[in-house]
Image (cartoon, rainbow, N blue to C red):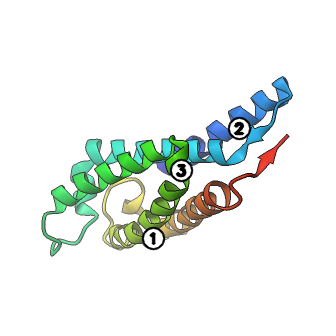
């Protein structure tokens, strides 16, 4: 249950810190920039999970999927690249779009893991875990779209 809290904290921290700094310094908050940084931090967290918990992540894939460990490392590498791109202004919008695609494509693995009680990150709770994971996926997709992609010139003062 701790994992969704960590994800939300990583997602929100840069924009919260930037907001507080802007209020103290009386400057303008670049919402898109710091929202992308938060999303980038979450992708670094996902990448680390793919390295540290690779055996558990392999179990999230059905046995009939070939090269499961290689897929875990490959998708972890993709998450690292997306995380880095989210910190580089010229790639942020594209990286946020890729992030949305990743969230959509990877979600079936979460469904499989929940229905098969895979003991990783809450999936061992069974299908009820999807009541947490599903809304979290929606939050991540909404964050990427509304704060990182849409209205690139949006700023708060």
* Nearer to us: label 1 or label 3: 3
Most foreground residue, 21 or 121: 21
Residue wearing tag 1: 104
Q: Quadrant of residue 22?
A: top right
Looking at the image, do the residues carrying marks 1 and 3 touch, with CB atoms under 8 Å apart? no
Q: Quadrant of residue 63?
A: bottom left
| Mark sitting on residue 88 | none
3D distance between C-alphas at marks 1 and 3: 19 Å
Q: Percent x, y for residue 123?
A: 39, 61
3D distance between C-alphas at marks 3 and 2: 19 Å
| Sooner in the amino-acid sequence: mark 1 or mark 2 | 2
3D distance between C-alphas at marks 1 and 2: 27 Å
Most foreground residue, 24 or 115: 24
Q: Of helix, strand and loop, which one carries label 2?
A: helix
Residue wearing tag 2: 16
> Callout 3: few (<14), some (14-19), or many (20+) C-alpha neighbours within 10 Å?
many
Locate the C terminus and report the quarter of the image it occupies.
top right
> Callout 1: few (<14), some (14-19), or many (20+) C-alpha neighbours within 10 Å?
few
Q: In the figure, 70 relative to 127: above or below?
A: above
| Mark sitting on residue 92 | 3
Taking the view exactly as shown, the residue that stands out farthest to the top is 25
Q: In the figure, 86 relative to 22: above or below?
A: below
Q: Percent x, y for residue 152?
A: 68, 54
């Amino acid at each position: 249950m701790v994992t969704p809290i960590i994800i939300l904290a990583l997602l929100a921290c840069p924009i919260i810190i930037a907001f507080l700094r802007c209020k103290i310094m009386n400057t303008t908050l670049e919402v898109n920039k710091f929202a992308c940084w938060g999303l980038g931090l979450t992708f670094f967290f996902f990448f680390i999970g793919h390295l540290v918990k690779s055996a558990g992540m392999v179990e999230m894939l059905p046995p009939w999927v070939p090269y499961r460990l290689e897929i875990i490392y490959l998708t972890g590498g993709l998450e690292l690249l997306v995380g880095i791109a989210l910190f580089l202004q010229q790639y942020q919008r594209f990286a946020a779009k890729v992030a949305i695609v990743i969230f959509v494509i990877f979600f079936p693995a979460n469904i499989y893991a929940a229905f098969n009680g895979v003991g990783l990150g809450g999936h061992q709770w069974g299908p009820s875990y999807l009541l947490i994971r599903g809304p979290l996926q929606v939050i991540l997709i909404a964050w990427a779209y509304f704060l990182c992609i849409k209205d690139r010139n949006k700023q708060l003062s």
